[in-house]
Amino acid sequence: MTLRPKILLRVYLLTLLIIVVMSVTYYYLFTRDVRERSHQNVRRTFDVVFDDLSARVEAVRSKIDLFVQTSLSRPKINSDDKTADLYLKRAAQFMVQGVPDDWDGIETLDHK
């Protein structure tokens, strides 16, 4: 083999090597960029979803607290409703004294 074909062969091999290295580098940089953008998009999506979820949970908790404070602590009953008055008195009695051990959940009315 003469000198000229050896030089041409080396030039071709060097060119091929440069092309392969550039291709690998481009592929690596391109896929890294795509991965970073995908990661950022997924992270943003999770942030939006979980921020919204936490805001909803907090809203539900505050509504439950408001309901408990307003509706259960001060029930709105008709002052002429003797049945409701009886239930409230018994509930208050059970809260203070506790429920008897032998109580089966049935109360006998002795007056009308």
Image (cartoon, rainbow, N blue to C red):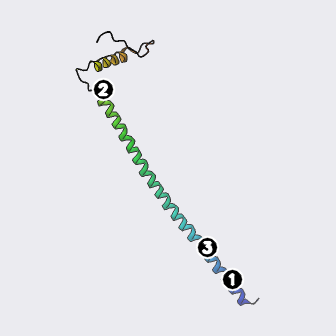
Q: Nearer the viewer, mark 1 or mark 2?
A: 2
Say what amino acid the circle numbered 1 marks: Arg
First along the sequence among labels 2 and 3: 3
Where is residue 25 shown, x and y percent of the image?
Answer: 58, 70
Say what amino acid the circle numbered 3 marks: Val
Mark number, residue 10: 1
Mark number, residue 21: 3
Say what amino acid the circle numbered 2 marks: Ser
Where is residue 46 shown, x and y percent of the image?
Answer: 45, 51
Q: Residues within 10 Å of mark 1 (few under 14, many from 20)?
A: few
Residue in the image at 67% along x and 80% along y = 13
Left-right relation of 84 to 42: left
Left-right relation of 51 to 85: right
Q: Quadrant of residue 22 in the image? A: bottom right
Query: How far separated are the C-alphas under marks 1 and 2?
Result: 92 Å
Residue in the image at 41% along x and 45% along y = 53
Q: Residue furthest front?
A: 112
Mark number, residue 73: 2
Helix, strand or loop at disc 3? helix
